[in-house]
Image: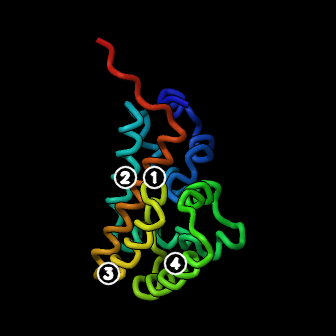
């Protein structure tokens, strides 16, 4: 659907269509609805990312806690959101890699209090495992900022899968 159609959606339809652009956080979509009309897809993306950036640190951590563990329990139990399932499937981890990732995820979650978040669609399995190991060495504030940047990447890709790109300017 194009940005004109997005702008014309009722509150309920807007939230329904865009409810999971930020994993399990439809309240963000609900808040952004009041910022309509959006001049473009880029303006919608900016509204969501600006809203996230304006949150206090506890709010940002709340967003991170809404994310599932990468290749974790929700994947094994079949309870991932459709979006996360599609994104994680692209990583292509085998059983040994899943076990290794589960161990690292446990260490990460213990250290930071939220799951490891990475834009799986922008990384292969080697890069994901490398980033998980590297980011375990971050301080809490640095890692929260890194994880929020990954949330914004995921959000932009999800929006782009739902909203048609802006047409080129006509001269």
* Residue occupied by mark 4: 101
Q: Residue at x 28, y 11 (%)?
A: 171
Of 123 and 112, the residue lying toward us: 123
Mark 3 falls on what kind of element? helix
Q: Which residue is mark 1?
A: 155
What's the CA distance linking mark 4 and mark 3? 20 Å
Binning the other alpha carbons within 10 Å of mark 1 as few (below 14), some (14 to 19) or many (20 upward) gives many
In the image, farthest residue toward the right: 77
Task: Decide if residue 121 is on the left or right side of residue 45.
Answer: right
Mark 3 — residue? 140
162 is higher (above) or lower (below) than 108:
above
Pointers 2 and 1 in contact (C-beta within 8 Å): yes
Above or below residue 14? Residue 129 is below
Mark nearer the N terminus (2 vs 4): 2
Give the residue at mark 2: 49
Return the disc, 1 or 3, that comes first in the chain's sequence. Answer: 3
x and y, in percent, of residue 79 in the image: 69, 67
In front here: 151 or 12? 151
CA neighbours of label 2 inside 10 A, class few (<14), some (14 to 19), many (20+): many
Question: Tag 2's secondary structure?
Answer: helix
């Amino acid at each position: 659907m194009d940005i004109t159609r997005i702008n014309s959606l009722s509150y309920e339809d807007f939230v329904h269509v865009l409810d999971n652009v930020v994993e399990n956080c439809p309240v963000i979509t609900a808040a952004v609805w009041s910022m309509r009309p959006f001049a473009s897809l880029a303006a919608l993306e900016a509204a969501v990312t600006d809203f996230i950036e304006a949150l206090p640190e506890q709010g940002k951590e709340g967003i991170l806690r809404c994310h599932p563990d990468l290749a974790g329990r929700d994947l094994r139990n079949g309870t991932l959101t459709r979006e996360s399932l599609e994104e994680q499937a692209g990583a292509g981890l085998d059983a040994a890699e899943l076990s290794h990732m589960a161990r690292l995820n446990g260490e990460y979650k213990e250290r930071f209090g939220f799951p490891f978040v990475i834009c799986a669609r922008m990384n292969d399995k080697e890069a994901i495992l490398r980033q998980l190991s590297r980011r375990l060495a971050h301080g809490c504030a640095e890692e929260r900022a890194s994880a929020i940047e990954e949330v914004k990447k995921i959000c932009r890709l999800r929006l782009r899968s739902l909203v048609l790109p802006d047409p080129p300017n006509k001269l």
